[in-house]
Image: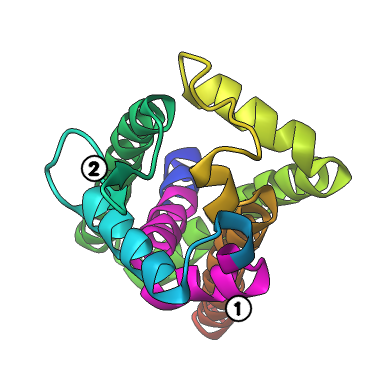
Amino acid sequence: MHSALALALLVLPIALAVRYAATSESWWERGFERYDAVSRTGLTPAEVDRVAAETRDYLANDDDLLNVSVDGAPFYSEREVLHMVDVKRLMARVYDAGWAALGFIIAFAIITFWRSKQALRRLARSILSACGIVALVFVVLAIIGLSGFDAAFRSFHQIFFTNDLWQLTSRDSLIQLFPQRFFFDTTVLIALAILIPLTTLSALSWFIVRRTEPR
């Protein structure tokens, strides 16, 4: 049960961070400014903003294909459009997993309070154990990511995508807008989204366990 709780505590912040990174105008603008999207794409700042807004809208709406034009011509190639279909499907699965994780955490808390006389202490101990598992997974993933992000990024795509549409070049619009360094920053964001609540939950749970210890 602790392993299931650990998985839920890992999946939920990942889903929240992915949703933020995919829908936040400020996060995209930060990346565009930092990695000079205007120069990389050859678009004006206004065009970059419009292309970005339409791309974000696609990730949040029910459209099957991404359709963005600049000066009457498609901005994204057919290969990029098809890859974005895969991206959108993957994001939907991540969001679904986040909702499932939230439901499990709530159900776990309710059942714990219903079945145990020392519910708060038992819940805190369970969270501590789960956070320990999450911390171990986090450290392993962090070592893999920091020791070779290029390889980790490639492995991620090989695991979660069943085709080679993700293999794009610097001439492709997606790469010009979102270079690999943008995704490194997003990975750091996701890591912080895990680390901050993990640390807070661990500290709070430890405090509860100590305060409710039988004397």
Badge 1, how many Cα within 10 Å: few under 14, some, many 20+?
some
Whole-angstrom CA distance, mark 1 to mark 2, is 47 Å
Rendered position, 85 above or below 203:
above
Name the residue nearer the viewer: 118 or 105. 105
Badge 2, how many Cα within 10 Å: few under 14, some, many 20+?
some
Name the residue nearer the viewer: 142 or 75. 75
- Whether residues under marks 1 and 2 lie with C-beta atoms below 8 angstroms apart, the answer is no
Instruction: Give the amino acid at mark 2.
Output: Asn
Among the 4 quarters of the image, the one containing residue 157: top right
Name the residue nearer the viewer: 42 or 110. 42
Q: Is residue 99 visible?
A: yes
Q: Which mark is residue 67?
A: 2
Determine which residue is flagged by label 1.
Answer: 203
Q: Nearer the viewer, mark 1 or mark 2?
A: 2
Magenta stretch in the rendered image: 9-38
Lateral position of residue 25 relative to residue 140, left or right: left
Within the magenta stretch, is there residue 134? no
Can you give x and y, in whole percent of width and height, for residue 198 in the image?
57, 67
Q: Determine the residue positioned at 34% across, 32% down.
A: 81
Sequence-wise, which precedes: disc 1 or disc 2?
A: 2
Can you give x and y, in whole percent of width and height, for residue 210 in the image?
59, 80
Q: Secondary structure at mark 2?
A: loop
Type of secondary structure dominating the magenta stretch? helix
